Image (cartoon, rainbow, N blue to C red):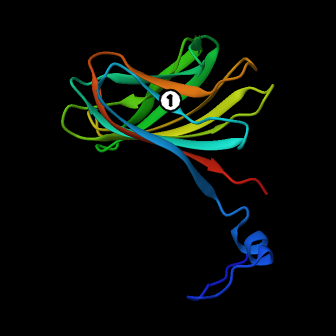
């Protein structure tokens, strides 16, 4: 993509906008925070974008595993998730961290009581096609970097992702971005 440096007072024309600003990467969609939550929803998903990036970060009242489930309004899409999760730890150990085989949700990492965890999920959301994703996270409890990829073997719609801890409550924030289409 072309790059242009604009100067103060310069008029931004339609041609400049189309050339230099279109297809420029991520666009902020929505965000939120949660405190003492038993779950939280990442909202703002529409047909505006095909590819999205969701990220969240937080701590837990204990050390819960965090799992994601797609929702359409209040209806859970709680079946048919398939994914593999690997890890690399600070002590140079590696391995399989988790997996989903026709599961009700998919693993998104683990929160800690004292070290903030972070997860980034890149996913594809297109009408009448399967949800597919890649994921990377830092687990604050185990000091592991995890990586995952998977899909949901169904083509129904969804407008949110619910993140639910396996135990306790969680506190943190989330962001959602869409990728501009070429």
The residue beneath circle 1 is 85
Answer yes or no: is residue 77 visible.
Answer: no
User: Residue at the spot x=68%, y=35% of the render?
Assistant: 46
Up the image or down, 71 lies above or below 5; here it is above
Q: Quadrant of residue 80?
A: top right
20 or 64: which is nearer to us?
A: 20
User: Residue at the spot x=35%, y=16% of the render?
Assistant: 166
100 relative position to 143: left or right: right
41 or 145: which is nearer to us?
A: 41
Residue 49, given in percent of the width and then of the height, sits at 71, 44
Answer yes or no: is residue 91 visible.
Answer: yes
Residue 77, given in percent of the width and then of the height, sits at 61, 14
43 relative position to 127: left or right: left
Q: Quadrant of residue 89?
A: top left
Residue 81, given in percent of the width and then of the height, sits at 61, 18
User: Residue at the spot x=66%, y=51% of the render?
Assistant: 179
Q: Quadrant of the N terminus?
A: bottom right
């Amino acid at each position: 993509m072309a790059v242009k440096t604009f100067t103060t007072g310069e008029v931004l024309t339609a041609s400049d906008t189309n050339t230099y600003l279109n297809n420029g990467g991520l666009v902020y969609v929505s965000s939120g925070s949660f405190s003492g939550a038993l779950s939280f929803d990442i909202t703002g998903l529409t047909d505006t974008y095909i590819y999205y990036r969701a990220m969240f970060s937080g701590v837990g009242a204990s050390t819960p595993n965090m799992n994601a489930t797609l929702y359409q309004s209040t209806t859970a899409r709680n079946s048919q998730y398939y994914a593999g999760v690997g890890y690399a730890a600070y002590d140079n150990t590696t391995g399989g961290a988790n997996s989903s085989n026709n599961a009700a949700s998919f693993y998104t990492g683990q929160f800690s009581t004292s070290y903030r965890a972070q997860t980034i999920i890149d996913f594809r959301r297109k009408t009448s096609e399967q949800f597919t994703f890649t994921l990377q996270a830092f687990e604050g409890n185990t000091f592991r970097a995890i990586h995952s990829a998977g899909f949901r073997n169904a083509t129904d719609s969804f407008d949110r992702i619910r993140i639910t801890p396996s135990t306790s409550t969680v506190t943190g924030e989330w962001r959602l971005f869409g990728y501009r289409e070429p």
